[in-house]
Amino acid sequence: MAEQTTPPGGTGAAGALASGPPGRSAEARPDKPDAAVVRDALGVGIAVGLSGFAFGVTSAGSGLSLLQTCVLSLLVFTGASQFALVGALAAGGNPYTAAAGAFFLGVRNAFYGLRLSQLLALPRAVRPFAAHWVIDETTAVTLPQPTRRAARIGFTVTGLTLYVLWNLTTLVGALGAEALGDTDVWGLDAASPAVFLALLAPMLKSTIERVTAGLAVLLALTLLPVLPAGVPVLLSALAAPVVLFLMGRTKRGPEAEDGAAARQRKTAQQEKEERRP
């Protein structure tokens, strides 16, 4: 995370971040009570943290040991990537392909970190620990906060609550997997994707974002029956460059037409001038 050099109350970008997200006036950024921030953060942390039970059950059902399951939650700690990994392994996918799919899903957290590093401006000693908590849920809670103080509280409470609960429920789920029997019957592997979609959907505000997400889903579902487990997730990432390419061509079309019309007008004007005595 980038180091903050300007005092929170100062001018420039740092001062703007201290008072709230860019693009809003001071009047539009009323202070939010700390209790309200904590309440919202706890709501997200508890709701999502409990789904660690589903991961523990799914991981144990895919053949991972209790130790492997718990280490995944402790060190990886990004639910979608963890589910992608154990899901691909359970479906008989290649371990390297499964790991690659999980890795590329986790890369999104690096982009979250670029934004949160400026917004939170945490001390250098704290950043390595905070980076471990840069996930979908902490980002979703942190970004809407009106002030830096509220953003830090939201990030910390969400991250701590979710990390503790996720790891505890992972342990409980892995221990209870044998008692549940066939884990596929319970459909618990759908818990984390459902939570992820619930958090993601409100963030898809522009047409480009919605089209990209829709195309990625279509690619994954189309390729799922014909490719090894884990590969459709990797290839669905192609939706982003495809949409950007098509949008670029769409924009260049009117520009090219305008340019051709301008050239025609210029040529006609030159011909008129040449015919003048």
Image (cartoon, helix red, strand yellow):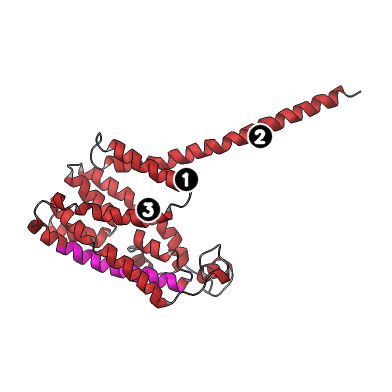
Q: Which residues are magenta?
A: 149-172
Q: Amino acid at mark 3?
A: Arg
Foreground residue, 216 or 5? Answer: 216
Foreground residue, 131 or 227? Answer: 227
Among numbered discs 2 and 3, the one appearing first in the sequence: 3
Foreground residue, 15 or 186? Answer: 186
Asked whether disc 2 touches disc 1, contact meaning CB atoms under 8 Å apart, the reply is no
In the picture, the quarter occupied by the C terminus is top right
Q: Marks 2 and 1, how far apart in space?
A: 24 Å
Among numbered discs 2 and 1, the one appearing first in the sequence: 1
Which mark is nearer the camera, 1 or 3? 1
Q: Amino acid at mark 1?
A: Ile
Label 3 sits on residue: 108
Q: Amino acid at mark 2?
A: Asp
Characterize the local packing of mark 3: few (<14), some (14-19) or many (20 or more) Cα atoms within 10 angstroms. few
Label 1 sits on residue: 208
Which mark is nearer the camera, 2 or 3? 2
Q: Marks 2 and 3, how far apart in space?
A: 38 Å
Tell me the residue at 36%/64% (across/down): 138
Q: Is residue 63 above or below residue 43?
A: above
Residue 162 lies in the magenta stretch: yes
